[in-house]
Amino acid sequence: MKIETLEKIKEFNEKAGLLQYGFKDFKENQYVIEEALEGFDTSYLANKLNVHEDATPKDISRAIVTGCCALAEPIEDVDRLDKILDIIYFSYGAALKLGLSHSQIDRAMDIVCKANLTKLSVGKDEQGKQMKPIDFISPEPELQKILDERK
């Protein structure tokens, strides 16, 4: 990933006020689980977790992490860092498995960074997650163009 892309990610986190509170196990894990659940039929999980049947991935991820946090032992920062880096490692590998080049992955990250920066004009939900503006332009059409370039 280009340093410019990493700087955009840092900029978003700074402007959204996310860095000032430090690492929060609940939020960091909830966001990753929410993204992992997107696009899946989550009705089974909603039922098992006793969450309303039309629960979103956000609702379900919060229920999962709430249950897990209640039972969890404190985690050392070295274990947090290892987990974070494993997520990056597997995510980058997954993008490669989609048939994307390093350059295409960088361009896709730039598109997502730009879209996320537009969220800064809106507030956060009750859990502190940055909300999307009403006129939010989804990055998917631009990402699809990159996917269409694959050989």
Image (spheres, rainbow, N blue to C red):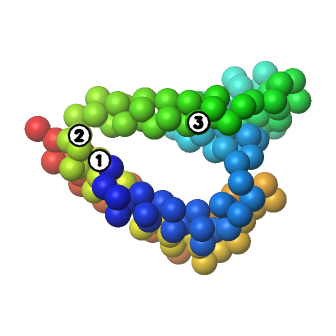
How many numbered tags mark residues here?
A: 3
Q: Is residue 73 above or below residue 6?
A: above
Q: Position of residue 99 (x, y in %)?
A: 22, 34
Q: Residue furthest left?
A: 151
Q: Secondary structure at mark 3?
A: helix
User: Within 10 angstroms of label 3, few (less than 14), some, or many (20 or more) residues?
Assistant: few
* Residue labelled with disc 3: 81
Q: Is 27 placed left or right of 132 in the picture?
A: right
Nearest the camera: 52 or 72? Answer: 72
Q: Amino acid at mark 2?
A: Leu
Mark 3 and mark 2: span between their CA atoms? 26 Å
Quarter residue 45 falls in: top right
Q: Secondary structure at mark 2?
A: loop
Q: Give how far across and how far down residue 104 sits, in percent.
A: 23, 49
Q: Is residue 136 visible?
A: no
Q: Earlier in the sequence, mark 3 or mark 1?
A: 3
At x 74%, y 46%, the residue is: 24
Q: Is residue 123 above or below residue 21?
A: below
Q: Which residue is mark 2?
A: 100
Q: Secondary structure at mark 1?
A: helix
Residue at x-position 20% and y-position 41%: 101
Residue at left offset 83%, top offset 25%: 73
Mark 3 or mark 2: name the one nearer the start of the chain.
3
Question: Mark 2 packing: few (<14 Cα in 10 Å), some, or many (20+)?
Answer: many
The residue labelled by disc 1 is 105
The residue depicted at 23 percent of the width and 44 percent of the height is: 102
Instruction: Bin the neighbour count of mark 1 within 10 Å (Cα to Cα): few under 14, some 14-19, many 20 and up.
Output: many
In space, the residues marked 1 and 2 are separated at their CA atoms by: 6 Å
The mark lying in front, picked from 3 and 2, is 3
Q: Position of residue 118 (x, y in %)?
A: 51, 72
